Amino acid sequence: MSTELDPGSWATLTPEPEFVITAAAHAAFAATPTMIFSATASDPSGFEIQSIALTIQVMIDPARRGYEPETRARLAELFGAPASWAPATSGLAWARVATTVPSFAGSTTFAIEVPCTYDLEVAAAKYFYAVRDGEVPLSFHFNGNVFFHGAQDRLQVVPVAWSSTAKYRMPIAAWRAMIGEHYPGGGWIRLSDETLEALNERRAERGLPSFDACVRELLDG
């Protein structure tokens, strides 16, 4: 419900929307792995918001949860050996995405789509791969512009407050369900052209049925 606005306050009052993340689920049957975060935008100013153009930096906050010894060992590449292990307090960058909040007065819901990768050379993917259960602490940092109808119904624009952030704890099961749909029973690694050619030649020479079998033979050797 919108709030009745005192005409004398038009000149000084501006919208200051706040954002909350409420849920996370992967986009089923999407062409590429995509996580969708459900969010709400609310503004008590009473203005009619035409739209909000948002850019969102999504960060992983490793220091906001605990880890068992096995997970610490898997995270050694990111944070060092378990004996001296300390999560990065500044967080790990996951994604930077854009979205538009539709017209509303009072509050509304919107979605944030985050493209994902299973490339284990990417720090965020390494972290998700290492964490097998529980939740992943995330921070959403918002910036952009609010378009609203001000005095005499004139369209005006103000920036989103630089301090606009939202915290959310994403169940790691949601990320694993997404990866399981796109890479069932397997994963993805990047190889240089030279390495790929060498593996292909060895696979053919050894009469192996797949690259997986070729790599397994090399590991067993």
Image: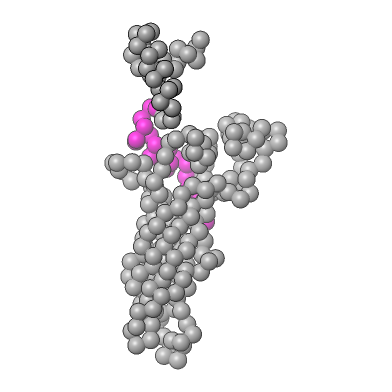
Q: Is residue 162 magenta?
A: no
Residue 115, given in percent of the width and then of the height, sits at 39, 46
**Direction top: furthest residue:** 206
- Residue 5's place in the image compared with 81, above or below, is below
- Residue drawn at x 59%, y 37% as measured from the top left: 78
Q: Is residue 178 visible?
A: yes
Q: Quadrant of the N terminus?
A: bottom left
Q: Is residue 1 visible?
A: no
User: Number of numbered discs present?
Assistant: 0
**Direction right: furthest residue:** 84
Q: Is residue 172 magenta?
A: yes
- Residue drawn at x 41%, y 75% as measured from the top left: 157
- Residue 181's place in the image compared with 89, above or below, is above
Residue 108, given in percent of the width and then of the height, sits at 37, 66
**Direction front: furthest residue:** 194
Q: Nearer the viewer, residue 109 or 209?
A: 209
| Left or right position of 41 against 141 | left
- Residue drawn at x 52%, y 61% as measured from the top left: 165
Residue 57, given in percent of the width and then of the height, sits at 48, 55
**Direction bottom: furthest residue:** 8
Q: Quadrant of residue 81?
A: top right
Q: Quadrant of residue 109?
A: bottom left
- Residue drawn at x 36%, y 64% as measured from the top left: 101
Residue 186, given in percent of the width and then of the height, sits at 39, 27
| Left or right position of 140 against 214 | right
Q: Nearer the viewer, residue 30 or 67?
A: 30
| Left or right position of 201 against 165 | left
The way the protein has been coloured in the rendering is one colour
- Magenta residues, as a range? 167-186
